[in-house]
Image (cartoon, grey):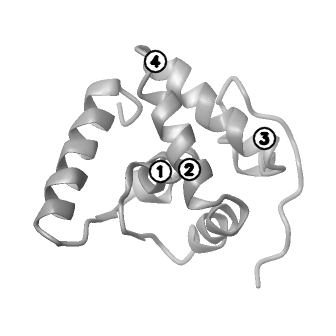
Amino acid sequence: NEYHPAVLASLKLIVEGAKRAKKPVSICGEMASDPASALLLLGCGIDSLSVSMASLPRIKWIVRSFSCQQMRQIFDAAMQLHDPAEIRTLADNALIKAGLGALVRAGSPNHHVQQPPKPD
């Protein structure tokens, strides 16, 4: 589960080690393509995300809607939680609060219907 605190803590350790070594950290795949996960990854300090073309507009929407500081604060708040479902809810609620509720995955307890903006 990508929202498990141990997974997020491990990623944070990797990012910290890479920063000390002056190396960038990139993530690709499903986790990078999921809006709530991407928000946490960017807040963790991941330098770049590799996502499919279909996911790109959603991830761009996040990058344009949150400052680096806001993403860090969300990640730090997530690291205070112990339950993956609580972490997912925290990230989903941040997206909803920012007007990005359309990005909240169907099937999430926080899902509601909202139309996303048209991609650039």
The tag earlier along the polypeptide, 2 or 4, is 2
The tag earlier along the polypeptide, 2 or 1, is 1
Residue name at image x 55 percent, y 41 percent: 73
The residues tagged by marks 3 and 4 sit, at their Cα atoms, a distance apart of: 19 Å
- The local crowd at label 4, few if under 14, some if 14 to 19, many if 20 or more residues have their Cα within 10 Å, is some
- Mark drawn on residue 71: 2
Residue name at image x 24 percent, y 72 percent: 24
Asked if the residues shown at circle 1 and circle 3 are in contact, with their CB atoms under 8 angstroms apart, the answer is no
Secondary element under disc 4, as helix, strand or loop, is loop
Kindly identify the amino acid type of the residue bearing the numbered disc 4.
Leu
Mark 1 lies on residue:
43
Which quadrant of the view contains residue 79?
Answer: top left
Mark 3 lies on residue:
96
Q: What percent of the width, then of the height, locates residue 63?
A: 62, 66
Asked if the residues shown at circle 2 and circle 1 are in contact, with their CB atoms under 8 angstroms apart, the answer is yes
Q: How many marks?
A: 4
- The local crowd at label 3, few if under 14, some if 14 to 19, many if 20 or more residues have their Cα within 10 Å, is some
Q: In which quarter of the image is the C terminus?
A: bottom right
The residues tagged by marks 1 and 4 sit, at their Cα atoms, a distance apart of: 15 Å
Side (left or right) of 52 relative to 25 = right
Mark 4 lies on residue:
81
Side (left or right) of 35 relative to 50 = right
Asked if the residues shown at circle 2 and circle 4 are in contact, with their CB atoms under 8 angstroms apart, the answer is no
The residues tagged by marks 3 and 2 sit, at their Cα atoms, a distance apart of: 14 Å
Kindly identify the amino acid type of the residue bearing the numbered disc 1.
Gly
- The local crowd at label 1, few if under 14, some if 14 to 19, many if 20 or more residues have their Cα within 10 Å, is many
